[in-house]
Amino acid sequence: MSLSRSRVVVGLGVAALFAAIGLTGLVSRSLSVSTFAAQSKASAPGAEQKPLEFLAGKWRFAGTTHDSQFGKGGKTTGTTSCEWFDGRFHLVCRGEFTEADGTKATQMEIIGYSKMERMYERFHIDSSGGSSKATATLNGKTWGWHGTATLDGKKTRFDFPVTQTSQDSYTVKVTMTPEGGKPAVLEEVTATRIK
């Protein structure tokens, strides 16, 4: 499986390399109906959406990737803009970035809170053909984002905490842990609000 570094850092300054589980048939339809029913009862955003307000706006990020199975390390840069979707339950973010090798790409994310799962969710697509899903809990000013993917036949966990360091900045550290292996830092990113 060949994966580009663009699936490591995007949007909020990060994209993990994990795949969403594809549900089909009756299970998928019943989950969709349940999710719709649970969310349609909410007429206004709750306290869970309040922390997302920090991410709304325009951001510039700069990061350092480390040598890994995905390629040689180096500097990564980009910008992203996050706006509230109608109803103010989800943020929609669009951005562009340049990888360490000079490759440019674009991305889009949807970030929100699932009352059913009681955690934050992030859905991502990019112009390199990548897509991913992650979940997070919020502890103070840190979103503990994580997801999994199968790489080289091994289940691999990706962790990328997003920590608010000031009203106008945050940091991200992407770590990959293969099944039965040791964690390895893939990337470290700092994002700054564009005023």
Image (cartoon, rainbow, N blue to C red):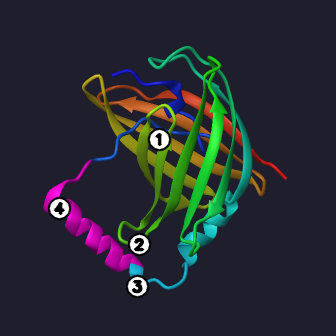
Marks 4/2: CA–CA distance: 19 Å
Marks 2/3: CA–CA distance: 11 Å
Q: Residue at x 15, y 58 (%)?
A: 25
Task: Report which residue position mark 3 lands on.
Answer: 41
* Discs 1/3, front: 3
Q: Specify which label sits upstream in the sequence, 4 or 3.
A: 4
The local crowd at label 2, few if under 14, some if 14 to 19, many if 20 or more residues have their Cα within 10 Å, is: some
Task: Report which residue position mark 1 lands on.
Answer: 159
Q: Residue at x 29, y 22 (%)?
A: 152
Q: Please identify the quadrant where the N terminus is shown.
A: top left
Across and down, in percent, residue 194 comes to 81, 49
Marks 1/4: CA–CA distance: 28 Å
Across and down, in percent, residue 160 comes to 52, 42
Quick check: 3 left or right of 8?
left
* Discs 1/4, front: 4
Can residue 12 be seen at all in this image of the molecule? no
Across and down, in percent, residue 89 comes to 54, 71
Q: Main secondary structure of the magenta part?
A: helix
* Discs 4/2, front: 4
Task: Report which residue position mark 2 lands on.
Answer: 115
Quick check: 25 left or right of 77?
left
Residue furthest to the right in view is: 195
Q: Residue at x 53, y 35 (%)?
A: 174
Task: Report which residue position mark 4 lands on.
Answer: 27
Marks 1/3: CA–CA distance: 32 Å
Residue furthest to the top in view is: 72
Q: Which residues are magenta?
A: 22-39
Q: Specify which label sits upstream in the sequence, 2 or 3.
A: 3
Q: Are marks 4 and 3 in contact (CB under 8 Å)?
A: no
Circle 2: residue type: Lys
The local crowd at label 1, few if under 14, some if 14 to 19, many if 20 or more residues have their Cα within 10 Å, is: many
